[in-house]
Amino acid sequence: MSENAHILVIDDEKNYLLVLQTLLEDAGYTVTAINDPVTALAFLQESEVDVVVTDMKMPHVSGVEILMQVKKQLPHIPVLIMTAFGTIESAVETMKYGAFDYITKPFSNDELLLSIHNAVELSRAHRQYRLLQEAMQERFGVHTLVGRSKNIVSVRQKIERTAPGRTTVLITGETGTGKEMAARAIHLASPRKDKPFVAVDCTSLSPEALERELFGSEIPSSVEGSPAIQRGRIEQAEGGTLFLDELAALSPDLQVKLLRVLQDRCLQRVGGTQSISVDVRFCMATTCDLQKKVEEGAFREDLYYRVNVVQLHMAPLRERREDIPLLVAHFIDKIRQDNNMTEVKSFSTKALNYLTGYDWPGNIRQLENIVENCMVLVPGQVIDEEDLPAEIRDEESQFKSAVDLLPVQLDLVATLNKIEAAIIRRALVRADLVQVKAAELLNISKSLLQYKLKKYGITGH
């Protein structure tokens, strides 16, 4: 029944300790019995146990102090308190600090064994829950898809529905919006999660080199009749997922070869003659409008319909501003862990307002870099507005960065409307959504602001 659970028993009375050890070992538990509470606390730092059973009154360190230390450092471990001086007040105190049970000496063996059995079951449940949490976090890539905006919620839902199959997924969005993160989330949520995830940037190589990279090659070797074989990235992803970033950069010839793989699920290496079957799930990504590329004759229409089976659109950060505080909190935790930081830091409300109001041309990638820069360089626990880089807090820099992103040829009226809407939205954020304050920041009347809000359909961030 115990399945060899490990119980740590702490009692300064050696005879009583021996009795407890014998009782628990006879019940099938692995028992470590320690009569010095200081030594016991040190043991807990280096050994995994399932349950702690401790006496209440001991020299140097009391049972309540042990309970508090365990709850602080190892909160998942149940602690049972034993005492020969039981009172209602002491029972209430121990339960207040999180004791699993409070047992008054003398007690029956059955009473103790039942309490320990229940504590072991709780400990195992906690362990299974932690393992499940870790597995779910990795499987669904939650750390890469933080947010509650409509876009990110929709993306997560599509991933959950799409992941179990082999359907090709096209992921669209600007640079830095997390397209590869979404592809990895699809892979980790699929039955292919234990197989390779292979990523290829289609812009990083010449067409000839990219062909060999994707399809592999067979070239003459020093051994007559035995070509030197190089397996390409598609073969390397066998059983798993191949992520092709910047799909629109493929040359016309490579588009044809990729189309054949998608249709027939087989390929030929460069220089080879043999047809090789492959079992690969394809995720493609692009920052371009592929439909427009098709219309321009730069991308094959038949390939477009092959890759555009399920489409995930990763919205730019400026269109999901409500996610920025969540992303900042996520990056703070991530950066603390990555850099072994012990100091807890946070962004002030004003600093968060600046971050939320900025347009983020580099999207999530840029936001993470800014958060890391502040975490590493800013002393103290609070990162304020003056600690932010100039491009975030400087009005002229913000305006220039936004203008530089605009294409040379554009619809001026529509563009000016978008800019005006963005400025109003930013003012609202910096005014904590108080319209009177926002109107003052914009130097317009409240009634004019309300007209603009209605015109652009602005209700919040």
Image (cartoon, helix red, strand yellow):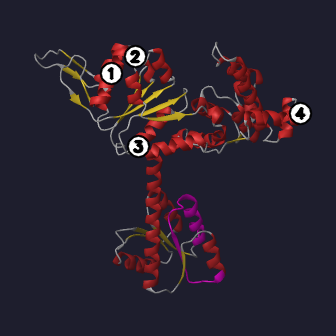
Q: Is residue 331 left or right of residue 135?
A: right
Q: Is residue 111 left or right of residue 370?
A: left
Label 4 secondary element = loop
Residue at screen point 41% across, 81% down: 19
Q: CA distance from mark 3 to mark 1?
A: 26 Å
The answer to which of marks 1 and 2 sits earlier in the sequence is 2
Label 3 secondary element = loop
Q: Amino acid at mark 2?
A: Leu
Give x and y (percent) for residue 290: 48, 23
Task: Identify the residue under disc 1.
Answer: 213
Q: Which residues are magenta?
A: 60-88
Q: Is residue 269 left or right of residue 305?
A: left
Q: CA distance from mark 3 to mark 4?
A: 51 Å
Task: Identify the residue under disc 2.
Answer: 205
Closer-to-camera residue (296/333): 296
Circle nearer the viewer, 4 or 1? 4
Give x and y (percent) for residue 348: 74, 41
Q: Is residue 11 above or below residue 237?
A: below
Circle nearer the viewer, 3 or 1? 3
Q: Is residue 419 left or right of residue 245?
A: right
The answer to which of marks 2 and 3 sits earlier in the sequence is 3
* Label number found at residue 163: 3
Closer-to-camera residue (224/237): 237
Label 2 secondary element = loop
The answer to which of marks 3 and 1 sits earlier in the sequence is 3
The answer to which of marks 3 and 4 sits earlier in the sequence is 3
* Label number found at residue 57: none
Q: Amino acid at mark 3?
A: Ala
Label 3 with label 4: CB-CB less than 8 Å: no
Task: Identify the residue under disc 4.
Answer: 445
Q: Amino acid at mark 1?
A: Glu
Label 4 with label 1: CB-CB less than 8 Å: no
